[in-house]
Image (tube, rainbow, N blue to C red):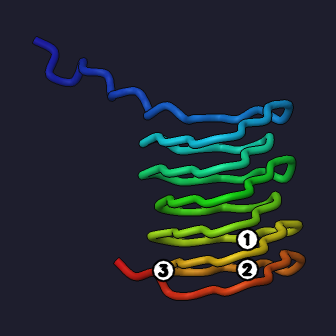
Amino acid sequence: MAWFSKTPPPPPPKTVLSPTAVLEGDLVTRSDVEIHGCLAGTLKTDSSLTVAQTGSLEGEARCSTLEAVGQLKGKFVTAGLSSFEQPARFEGDLSTRRLRIAAGAWLTGRIREFQT
């Protein structure tokens, strides 16, 4: 009898917006989100949000963690860490529990502590 023959569950799927994609509207998911293209609207996820260097997000977003290298504009709420790497550009309102800004990243707007 093989006690250790069970395979681990597959990793949860990611929602990926490709570099050539443009999405206008609302996106609601429980999975991690990677934006390599352009999203204009509202995004809600229980997981992480990554905006790649080729990506842009304009509107509102709510996520558990945020990693940005691309361009963001609007209102963002992050329950955990918000991280901005070079050459990220952020303009708007950010509510976050923790914040990391790398040299070369650009932020303007209002930043406040996340409230549950």
Which mark, by number, is residue 46? none
State the residue position of label 1: 84
Q: Nearer the viewer, residue 23 or 46?
A: 23
Left/right placement of residue 64 relative to residue 60 reads left
Query: Is disc 1 placed on a helix, strand or loop?
Result: strand
Residue occupying image coordinates x 75% and y 65%: 73
State the residue position of label 3: 97
Q: Answer above or below: position of 5 versus 58.
A: above
Task: Please provide percent x and percent y for residue 94.
Answer: 61, 77
Quadrant in which the C terminus is drawn = bottom left
Task: Please provide percent x and percent y for residue 114.
Answer: 46, 81
Quadrant in which the N terminus is drawn = top left
Q: Answer above or below: position of 57 versus 34.
A: below
Left/right placement of residue 24 relative to residue 89 reads left
State the residue position of label 2: 101
Q: Quadrant of residue 30?
A: top left
Could you tell me how far apart the alpha carbons at marks 1 and 3 are, in whole angstroms? 14 Å
Question: Contact (CB < 8 A) between labels 1 and 2?
Answer: yes
The amino acid pointed to by label 2 is Ile
Residue occupying image coordinates x 50% and y 51%: 44
The amino acid pointed to by label 1 is Phe
Query: Is disc 3 placed on a helix, strand or loop?
Result: strand
Left/right placement of residue 48 relative to residue 20 reads left
Question: Contact (CB < 8 A) between labels 1 and 3?
Answer: no
